[in-house]
Amino acid sequence: MSEPYLRLTGVHRHYGKDETFVRVLEAADLSVAGGELVAIVAPSGAGKSTLLHLSGLLERPQSGEIEITGTATMALSERGRTLLRRTTVGYVYQFHHLLPEFTALENVTIPQLIAGKSQAAADRRSRELLDLLGVGPRAAHRPAELSGGEQQRVAIARAAANHPRVILADEPTGNLDPETSDLVFSALQTLIRGEGAAGLIATHNHDLARRADRIVTIKAGLVEPLTL
Ligand code: ADP
Ligand code: MG
């Protein structure tokens, strides 16, 4: 099998000290391969967001190693981490965080222009993604004119715009009704498989989690397999 796109090895992460000390991850290991979708299901406060932040190089562990597309990140400078994050990681949050002044298409196009792509190539990629996620007909709408499920699918398209090899989603259906959650999860799944990216999704929804290739949880500082 090829190298996993995301690999955490012996990751320790705690916050605070003395009476504010919180141990979140003690010696966590996790690998996610290209095209694989892994769901994280764990109670609130267990460390799902922490695991995603660490995986997305948004924060650093106290020790351990995090490799993204085979690159070890612990020894990288802040600048090196930022560059790697920009080119290899796509992030989807519970709330969409789309830019309200711009259309759906523009929201997906902007990160590509920042990455140096031409307007024509960026527009092409954006339309392809919006079509894939079933929101092509909404390309010219601003976020306020979209439903919650549509907003979230545009946010997924934006996260995928620059062909990230790792797609991280933190309770992306947390604000949606069951039917819309299903649609958004399917969109994410289609995208991860279609793009061959490694997908890691935190969710409270057991029905959705069961559709992932694998489910993990966080227990006593470890990432462990879970059967629902
Ligand atoms: P989840 O996403 O599973 O709800 P989090 O990863 O957000 O859990 O948090 C895990 C634990 O770490 C919680 O106890 C939380 O209070 C604590 N925590 C998270 N971030 C910080 C921080 N920046 N400072 C102190 N404690 C934190
Ligand atoms: Mg969280």
Image (cartoon, rainbow, N blue to C red):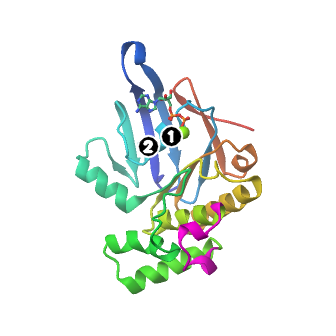
Label number found at residue 131: none
Range of the magenta residues? Answer: 135-148
Percent of width and height locating residue 79: 23, 52
| Residue 9 shows up from this direction | yes
Residue 36 coordinates in the image, percent (x, y)? 59, 55
Taking the magenta stretch, the answer to whether it contains residue 144 is: yes
220 to the left or right of 61: right
Residue at image point 50% right, 76% down: 105
Q: Callout 1: helix, strand or loop?
A: helix
**Mark 2: secondary structure:** helix
Q: Amino acid at mark 1?
A: Ser
Q: Is label 1's Cβ within 8 Å of ligand 2?
A: yes
- Crowd class of label 1 (few under 14; some 14 to 19; many from 20; radius 10 Å): some
Q: Residue at x 61, y 61 (%)?
A: 188
Provide the residue designation for mark 1. 49
In the displayed structure, does residue 79 sit left or right of residue 118? left
Decide which of 26, 117 is in the foreground and name it.
117
